[in-house]
Amino acid sequence: MRITPRARTRVAAVAVVAGAATFALSACGSGSDGGADQKIASAAPTHLSGTVSLWHFFSDREAKVIQGVVDDFEKANPDVKVVVHSGQDDEKLRKAIAAGNDVDVAISYSTDIVGNFCQSGAFQDLAKYIARDKVDIGQLLPTARNYTEFDGKRCAMPVLADTYGLYYNKALLSKAGIDAPPKTLDELESDALKLTTYNSDGSIKTLGFNPWMGYQEMAPAHLASATGAKWLDDDGKSVVGSDPGWKELIEWQKSFAEKIGIDKLKKFTAASADEFSAQNDFEIGRVAMNLDGEWRVAFMKDQAPKVDYGTVPFPTAADHTDLYGGGYITGNIGGIAKGSKNPELAWALLKYLTADTSAVVKLANGLQNVPTISSAFDSPDLVRDPHFETFLKIAQDKNSLTTPPSPNGAGYQLAFADWWQKYQTTPGTSDLDAQLKKVDDQINAAASLNSVP
C-alpha cells in the first residue's frame, strides 16, 4: 500500500502537504463548496456506460492488485472503460486537479490532505450521492469516518487502513528471561534495557527498543494512543502544550533515551539500514521490539520467514492501562476530483472501491492492509494471519485514534515532530511547558496563514 513502502510515503506526504498548503488553496479555489450544490440524478443509474479516469499512487505488484479490482468493476459494467493512471503521488495529483486535467477518481496515500481538499473543493462533497444511494457510513471504522471528512463535509472515502502495534522477537525475549511482551511504557523500557547488549567498545550491539524520535515509525502521532493525547481542540487550535498526555510521553521518551545514552543511540540509529530493506533492524535481530504497521507482517513473510515473532498492541502509560488494545490508525483515501467530467460514473467507481464488500476484501488481501468497512471484517474471504489479526483488532478497538484533518494538512504534526527531535538531545526538562507553548503558537500561526477566508 505504497509507492515506496507505506511509512516512507507517509513521511513524504507530511512534508508535501505542509509545504504546499497555500498552493493547493489558491490553485483549487478558495472556499469552494466542493460540489455541495451539484445536480445529481434522483436515483443511481441502472446502467453505467462511458469512460472514467482513476489516478492512484500504487506501482508494480500493488498496481496489479488495483487493476484486478478495476477489471472486476469493468466486467460487471461492460460498457464502462476505466483509464488508470498509476504511480501518481499526491503532488502530481494536486497539480493535475489544479490544472483541470482529466481526473475523475483519485486515491491519495495521505489522510493529511483531507482538511485541505475538503475545504478548498479539490475533492467534491459526497453527501448527496451517499444519501441518495443509502450508503451506510456507519459501516466505516470510526477512525476512518473521522479522517475522511472535515468540518462536517465528507469529501472522501477510506481505501483501506494502516494500524500500528508492537512487534517483538520471541527468541530474544525468552533469552532475556522475559515471559510476555510489555503492556505499559514502563515495562517496555525495563524490558528494552534488559534486552540491550553492547560491544566491547561500549557501543550498542542489540537494542531492546529504539526510543529515538525520528527512528523509523517513532513519530508523535504513532505514540499518542499510549496516553490518549490530543492534537487540536474543537476550533482547530493546537493543544499539544496543554494536553498532559503529550508531556507524559515526552518525558518518558527523553528519559528512556538518556538511560541508554544519547550519543550511543544516535550512532546506532545512523548505522541502521533502510527501514524497508531486507536488512531492517527488527528482521535481522538488531532490535528486539519495534513500533511498526501491519504491512511489516508481509515483509516478514518475504524477507525474514524464519524469525519467530509476535505482534501486540503498543503499550500504554501505566496510568492509562484502560486504553490498552488501541493504536494509531491512518490510511489511503479516495475522492471525486473537482472538475470531473463524469461525476456520476466516478461516484459509482469510488463507491465500488470503498463500500463493496467483495472489492474491499480483495483489496485488503492483495495489498495486505486493513479493511475499513465492518462487513469486510466479517467476510469469510478475508485472509486472517495470526500476526495480522492483531492489527485487525486494533483497527476495531474503541481506543484507537487518528490525527485530525486540518486545512494546514500535516503542518501541525511536522512542527511538533521537528521540535521533539531537537528536544530529545537538549539537557534538562525544566522549560518543557514553555517550549510546548511555543509549539502551540507556531502551529496556530501557520494554520491562520493557510486558512480559507
Image (cartoon, rainbow, N blue to C red):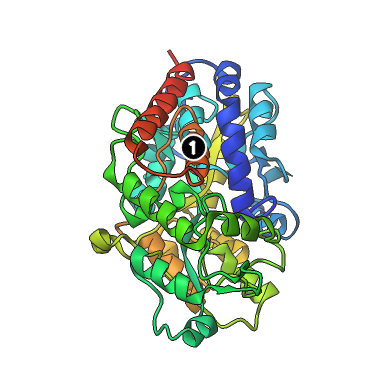
Q: Is residue 78 above or below residue 117?
A: below
Nearer to the camera, 343 or 298: 298
Measured from the top left, where is residue 341 in percent x and y? 63, 28
Binning the other alpha carbons within 10 Å of mark 1 as few (below 14), some (14 to 19) or many (20 upward) gives: some
Measured from the top left, where is residue 11 in percent x and y? 59, 44
Nearer to the camera, 301 or 441: 441
Measured from the top left, where is residue 63 in percent x and y? 71, 54
Q: Residue at x 64, y 75 (%)?
A: 301
Q: Residue at x 46, y 71 (%)?
A: 193
In the rendered structure, the answer to whether residue 343 lies left or right of residue 149 reads right
In the rendered structure, the answer to whether residue 59 lies left or right of residue 209 reads right
Measured from the top left, where is residue 54 in percent x and y? 66, 41
Q: Residue at x 60, y 24 (%)?
A: 339
Q: Is residue 124 above or below residue 77?
A: above
Q: How many numbered marks have been drawn onto this rendered protein structure?
A: 1
The answer to which quarter of the image holds residue 69 is bottom right
* Residue on which the image places disc 1: 419
Which quarter of the rendering shows the C terminus? top left
Q: Residue at x 31, y 60 (%)?
A: 317
Nearer to the camera, 405 or 320: 320
Amino acid type at circle 1 is Trp
For the residue labelled by badge 1, is the local secondary structure a helix, a strand or a loop? helix
Q: Is residue 373 visible?
A: yes
Residue found at the very far top of the displayed protein: 453
Q: Is residue 229 visible?
A: no
Residue found at the very far front of the displayed protein: 201
Nearer to the camera, 347 or 227: 227
Which quarter of the rendering shows the N terminus? bottom right
